Image: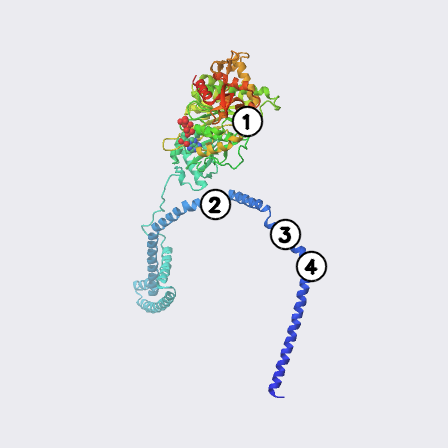
Amino acid sequence: MSVRGVTRAAVARVRATLLGWLSSVGAVVDAVAAWWIERVLCSPAYLTASVSVQKTVGSIRDWRVWPVLAEWIRAVARAVWRVVGPPVRDAVGWLRHRAPGVVWRGLCWLARRVPRWIWRATFYAFVGAWWVLSRTVRWASGHASYAGLVRQMDDDQRHGTAKRLREEWARMAALRSVLVLIVAVVVALVVTGVANKIGTVTAAVIVSGVFALVGRVIRSTPAGDDHGPEVIVHSGPDEPFPIADAHTRAEAADAVARALRTEGVDLRMVGEAVRQGWGWEVPVILRRGTPSQVVDKLAALETTLDLPAGGAMASPDRTRRARVVIRLAERDPFTGLSAAPSRPALPLVSRSITARLHVGSVITGEPLALGLLGVHGVVIGDTGSGKSSTLCTLADAVTDCADATVWDLDPAGTGLDVLADSIERSERTRAGIEDALADALALAEVRPHLLREMGMAGREWVPSPEHPAVVVFVDEYPRLSNAAKEMAVDILRIGRKARVSLLLASTEATSDTLGDAIADTTALKILHACRHADVRLVLGPSMLGEGWRPDRLNPASADSPEDAGCGYVYAPHYRDPVLSKFRPVSDEDTAERARQRAPHRPRVDAVSWEAARKRRHSNESGFTPGKSGRHRAALALPSPRSGEPAPLDRMAVADVLAAFGDDERVWTVDLLARLAGRHERYAEWTPEDLADALRPLGLSPAQIRQDGRNRQGYHRQAVSDALSRSERG
Ligand SMILES: Nc1ncnc2c1ncn2[C@@H]1O[C@H](COP(=O)(O)OP(=O)(O)OP(=O)(O)O)[C@@H](O)[C@H]1O
């Protein structure tokens, strides 16, 4: 066989062998893959495991606990921040405000000292160098060893010995000079070598440093530089400084301690200062005296600590007389307090008058939450202090309660007009206000007698959407008639149990304007910017010294809101003199809220109402003269049917007018149907009841032709004119 044939056969054998191996490997892989697919991937165990893994992954992803965990993490982060926050903020405050000053002072200090240091180092270096040179020369010359001896020999006429000593001296001087020269050359070579390595300047500095050290050792201080260290005294040890210069808690406490000591307050200690968004809160402990010592010094503290007017406040601790918390507001503490949004987060009219209602914020950062169930209140403040707005904020909160109805009486202004859609009764005239107060008084009188009939346990009316509490807002109280004021005082006395309460606003608290009884009877006292005397009248003479200082607030001026809406609240849960602010009122949003709430608002229940009407009728007819009988003349009108005075039911007349809607003439039967739709008390009304309600206005039904038919009915204009005439009368 030729060589070519042998080669081909070998190649063919190799190829066949390789193919054989490859096919065996492929067969093994196929077998393993088939086994894997059949025995593992398609096995029930694997399928079950993969399904459960998928489920687990899915459930972990959709785990409901994630938000809870996130909330936990946030809570933990908040707790950690509460602990580490103050020191961190102290450090940041120090770095921001103090560190640049410290660095600058350091630079100035260096700039002052460096020339002196250079001068001293140079001086010592020369001293050291001179000392080394002189000592070396003296040693090399051998002067110290031989000069004295030679002089002695000469004096003793021992010239031979002297000559021998001189020769010895000369040899020794030569030897030492050579030695010095060698050492000098070696040192010069070493220094030059080092200088080549590290630089001439550095080497020169090192050599100078060595000489300076030698000079420093042999001479302690350079002549003429013998004065002590300079001490620059910026302030005395107790000199006060502005609170704006305090950037750490310790500095704030120090500022307050110095300021109080400057004002002559004897302190035992100053507690830990707390940083607030608006400034500082610093508790102090008095050594002697009363907290009024601090309160009386507030104005002076504002100057000493360089604060805005009214920026210093003090609240004595009721549980520890020596402790007074001083608040230093460098900025407006209520910057973030905004009007309530037009669309509240909670469902419409879902609150209850039995709960505390959030109406503002306290300087401590807590919400101002007032309980208004059966609580009478008084709002005192100069003109522009925010009384009307506060009444509006309170009324806004009450109109969101499903179990309280709001009446709005204002003899001078526009009252709660912005909430008109959610107000059950609104009166602006003298007659209307007296009538409303007489109705409220009658309700307060009759409700306690209806408790059993209404199935209410206890001695107090239990408000519910069907039997709501009544909250009567009276702005400009001093301008009420005497009769109205008398009824208001009666309501203050007996209204609490019946859940008929009054919230009054007045510019002053003197007995001429507000009356003595009022401030004492009301559980809620709101003091906006007002006079010193008003604080004494409303809260008592000692409360000024206890930190109740609304007289230090300023009412709004033409171009600035100043402290409008801010005030001190004395109420259950609020017994400390801490500044609060009521939410401002946004007219558009408030009106929008009132419109949305209107369909859900409750009205005084028919049972109470009818009982109150009967009580008024009997009082005013003289059958059962009661306290309110003295208001008869102002309220009663002659009744043509009975010949006896019959009271005008203004609520019913207002409802009749509302029932007309846009129609000018309505048949009695339609009017009754519309009234029944407005309130349950009209459900049983007959044409005679309607006629009775309108008779005090001198109105009676007339023939009205509609759709070709004649029926009894009423004209809207006639009802409206008659009501206006009665109010004017
Ligand atoms: N909580 C508040 N926040 C901000 N501004 C307010 C607040 N309350 C009232 N104001 C502003 O203060 C000004 C005076 O308010 P308001 O009319 O309620 O005071 P007042 O005491 O009733 O005055 P007057 O006795 O003259 O009627 C208004 O411009 C009002 O917008």
- Is disc 3 in contact with disc 1, using a CB cutoff of under 8 Å? no
Where disc 1 sits, the SS reads: helix
Question: Amino acid type of disc 2?
Answer: Val
Q: Nearer the viewer, mark 3 or mark 1?
A: 1
Crowdedness near tag 3: few (<14), some (14–19) or many (≥20) residues, C-alpha within 10 Å: few
Q: Secondary structure at mark 4?
A: loop
Q: Nearer the viewer, mark 2 or mark 4?
A: 4
The label shown at residue 677 is 1
Inspect the image, locate mark 4, and give the three-letter code of the amino acid beneath it: Ser
On the rendered structure, is 707 left or right of 180? Answer: right
* Mark before the other along the chain sequence, 4 or 3: 4
Q: CA distance from mark 4 to mark 3?
A: 18 Å
Please report contact status of discs 1 and 4: CB closer than 8 Å, yes or no: no
Q: Residues within 10 Å of mark 1 (few under 14, many from 20)?
A: few
Percent coordinates x, y for residue 515 in the rendering: 45, 19
- Earlier-in-chain disc, 3 versus 1: 3
Kindly identify the residue that appears in the image at 54 percent across and 35 percent down.
Answer: 347
Q: Measure the alpha-carbon separation of dots 3 and 1.
A: 57 Å
